[in-house]
Amino acid sequence: MSQQLTDTHCHLILPEFSGDLDQTLERAQAAGIGTLIVPGIDLPTSRKAVSLAESRSGLFAAVGIHPHESEGWYQSAASELRELARSPAVKA
């Protein structure tokens, strides 16, 4: 039996993947990748990562604010990130 790999950082929520997400996931599976973690880089992309991860088997989300995006950081974002992190689909 072959071992499945995990891709710990794949931005599947970016526009580049919107047209071929299913094919991308099929290629990953064919390459032996059984789990993919989709990171958010700010609050909107964290929401999208959680939504995508909740809708697909083998996908999980990481929520947060990337340092390059931290200028717009505000306290209410921390509250929403904590709420997003409660989803079983969030692993980081």
Image (tube, rainbow, N blue to C red):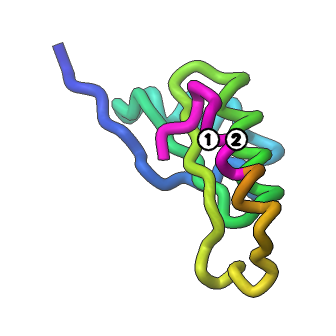
What residue sits right under mark 1 in the picture?
85
Tag 2: residue type?
A: Leu
Q: How far across and how far down the image is residue 39, in percent?
A: 59, 54
Question: Can the viewer see residue 41 in this picture?
Answer: yes
Check the image and report above or below for 75 versus 44: below
Q: Which of the numbered marks, if any, corresponds to residue 42?
A: none
Check the image and report above or below for 88 versus 81: above
Residue placed furthest toward the left: 1
The mark total stands at: 2
Check the image and report above or below for 1 versus 66: above
Q: Is residue 8 left or right of residue 18?
A: left
What residue sits right under mark 2 in the picture?
84
- Residue occupying the point 71% across, 41% down: 83
Say which element carries label 1. Answer: helix
Q: How far across and how far down the image is residue 50, in percent?
A: 70, 38
Labelled pair 2, 1 in contact (Cβ < 8 Å): yes
- Name the image quarter holding residue 25: top right
Tag 1: residue type?
A: Ala
- Residue occupying the point 20% across, 21% down: 2
Q: Which residues are magenta?
A: 81-92
Check the image and report above or below for 17 versus 66: above
- Residue occupying the point 66% across, 65% down: 41
- Residue occupying the point 69% across, 80% down: 70
* Magenta span includes 83: yes
- Name the image quarter holding residue 72: bottom right
- Marks 2 and 1, how far apart at CA: 4 Å
Say which element carries label 2. Answer: helix
